[in-house]
Amino acid sequence: MLNTPDSVPAAQITARPAAFRARPAARPALVALAALALLTGCSGGIAQSVSTAVKDSSSAVATARIALRQDMDGKLTKAATDTSLEDGLKEVEAGRSSVLKLSPATQEERVAQKQALDVLDQCAAGFATARAALAANDGGSPSLPDGDKALADAQDALKQLEGAVGSR
Amino acid sequence: MKRLLGVALGVLTAIGGFVDIGDLVTNAVVGSRFGLSMVWVVAVGVVGICLFANMSGRVAAASGRATFEVIRERLGARAGLANLSASFLINLMTVTAEIGGVALALQLASSVYYLLWIPVAALAVWLVIWRVRFTIMENVAGLLGLTLIVFAVALFLLKPDWGALAGQLAPSVPEQETVWTYSYYAIALFGAAMTPYEVFFFSSGAVEEGWTVKDLLQERINVLVGFPLGGLLSVAIAACAAVVLLPAGISVTSLSQVILPVAEGAGKLGLAFVLVGIVAATFGAALETTLSSGYTLAQFFGWSWGKFRRPAEAARFHVAMIVCLLIGMAVLATGVDPVQVTEYSVVFSAIALPLTYLPVLIVANDPQYMHEHVNGRVVNVLGMVYLVIILVASLAAIPLMIVTGAGS
Amino acid sequence: MILGDLLGTPVHDPDGGWLGRVADARFVLDGPPHQLMAEPRLLGLVVSPHSVASFLGYERNGLTHPWLLARILRWRHRGSFLVLWEDIAMVGPRSVRLRPGFTRYSTALEDRRQV
Amino acid sequence: MTSPSGPLPPVPRVAGRILDAQLHLMDRQVLDHDGVPVTTVDDLEVSGPALDVEIPPGTAPPVITALLTGAVLGTRIFGGRPPSSRLIRIPWKDVAEVEVVVRLGVSGEPLDASWVERWVRDKIIARIPGGRHDPR
């Protein structure tokens, strides 16, 4: 864990069970415990948020690549491909804005945030290329393979980042 | 011959009507994240809905009483009102999710942004409820929903490694998931299969169509054949996701991901079928949930209700439905993600399930209502087993939702 | 008066001892038919010492299925009894007082089919 | 006074049919003579006894005079008491049959209990095209 505040609720958690085991009427304690679990789950630190955003974005990019490939194979209609790309881009943007909202405390965290934002920007750019290719639709530039290439590069960058976040 | 046709039609509409946005989304999510390791939950849910729908249909046929009338009579005004509030809100959430589902499917077909489709979808739902006859409405939506069989066709065309697929059937938690997310989605899947609105709709529909005890056999066939086949359809959706999306590291968060495996296996034709199927299934479910919200309110307060009456003869019932559609539209207009609404609605359905299940189980044993058609011993034993399952799922849902951050 | 006001009211014996609460009111249709039906006259009150929450119909009409549910609900209403109108001394907004020497009757409904 | 232990004696036999208010009447659906739902039995009005007054032995038992509906449902659930003028009554003499549902021997249309339904119908539903269209 990167951020230290986590250790405080952890201490509280160990203090709680004795209180609510005492009698069933101590239900509020249980609720408080659940709320704590929720808080600790959400504030899992920068690493947690980055990892979630990266996971969601790599799922979105993978989806977009399948959709593009199907489009090139004539399996998907333009409307469906377009919607897929739009949904994927929305997912990446949501991840990006969640990372953007983080307030890093240490130098290490600032680096992690910066790296993640760079990669997520690259994803968004990949989506932009793919959508432009789909809109062009006349063999002009960018072409669908160009779009796929941009997304593939973004996918590689995501994988690297995933590895980096995982190892930290 | 005519009777045979009637049975066939009933079974087909039961299959086509089984899947709604909740089943579509939840099965795809589960398939993409957990493979086929939760098929057993679908099986448990399907047996549950067979049992439950069968009981409430029998209550409706034997006593002419729909589910919510029975709930109020048994629980009394106070507990009945608490029950009504919970059931009604969850039903409203489902209405919202279904209309959103129609709009999302129409976006996939047209690339026109889904928010623009929402007023169109809601207006169409209202027009059908206002004008179209109950049986026609039910049969057309159910038969068109049958095109979702394309999920099963696509699965065959994808030529998966059947052995490996069968190997996933054993209940087990994949390594990238925790036992908590697994349990959370198990409850969601159970809730999707056993949504309470299906029971409100089923029992009120029995009254709408004027069922008597003579129709009990046909009702039983519809349920016992149609729902399990509908369950197989759910499994096919999950399997498609498990074959195409799981290996690519995709976890489903939007409807556009649900259709990719079908396009992969069956191409543009398959895509056309699946889009028709999704629109029909979600539209049919939007009709059913909208009617259900009218049914629950009218039955609790004793208003005149039913599509078999002229709208003017069931005025409050119709106004209630119009208001529900407007609320659903307003909620969607805030830009909330319909897929997320769906995911929450199935879990809340699981939470509210005991509220409707228990009174039906009790009344199905009461000779004052049922005369000689009370539950048999086997049904009662199963009924009690399911009461326990439903209670456990209901009680575990909220803690699991908190611990897993709603399954993220 | 409104019957809903009476339901849930505490019931005391003549010495002020607490017996339970009014869980239901039993009526009987034995008068001459008025127009369509006879007027239901109050036969007595069902008093329950533990719970006045809904019985779900289990405690009085001999329902025994599903067995486990029937047992649980009966247990929740153990000790409930019926007092006849003749044994009621006073009805107040917060209390019902019984006459000295009142009789506790079984709350069971005879299993006769509804007429 | 009998002891609380041991089985209680059965009620002395009475000639007529027994109705338990909660079990058989309250919260039941009310249908009119054509089978059209009118309302539910939200509460019951009884003819007595006078509150807080010693009941002389031999006093005639109270009888049910009317089914109540409307605002009384809210006060039954949340407490309080609607003014007597706000009570919507369906007199017992209109009741024809008590089974799983309560059937009236009269038409529901002119009853006070139906005024909201009439209002919604006349002001809203009947004004929408097709509002009187027979679905059959």
Image: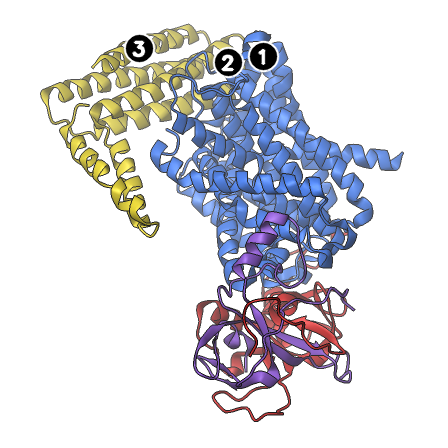
| Residue B244 marker | 2
Instruction: Tell which residue pokes out farthest to the right in this image.
Output: B1
Q: Mark 3 belongs to which amino acid?
A: Lys
Q: Colour of chain B?
A: blue
Label 1 in the same subunit as label 2: yes
Q: In which image quadrant can residue B388 be found?
A: top right
Q: Position of residue A16 (x, y in %)?
A: 24, 41
Q: In which image quadrant can residue C113 be found?
A: bottom right
In the rendered structure, the residue with mark 3 lies on which chain?
Answer: A
Choose between B383 and A74: the one closer to the eye. B383
Q: Chain A is drawn in which colour?
A: yellow
Q: Is residue B199 above or below residue B25?
A: below
Q: Is residue B252 above or below residue C69?
A: above
Are the two marked residues, 1 and 2, in contact with CB atoms closer than 8 angstroms?
Answer: yes
Q: Nearer the viewer, mark 1 or mark 3?
A: 3
In the rendered structure, the residue with mark 1 lies on which chain?
Answer: B
Q: Label 1, label 3: how many angstroms apart (C-alpha)?
A: 28 Å
Disc 2 element? helix
Residue named by callout 3: A159
Left or right relative to B205: residue B188: left
Choose between B108 and B256: the one closer to the eye. B256
Residue named by callout 1: B265
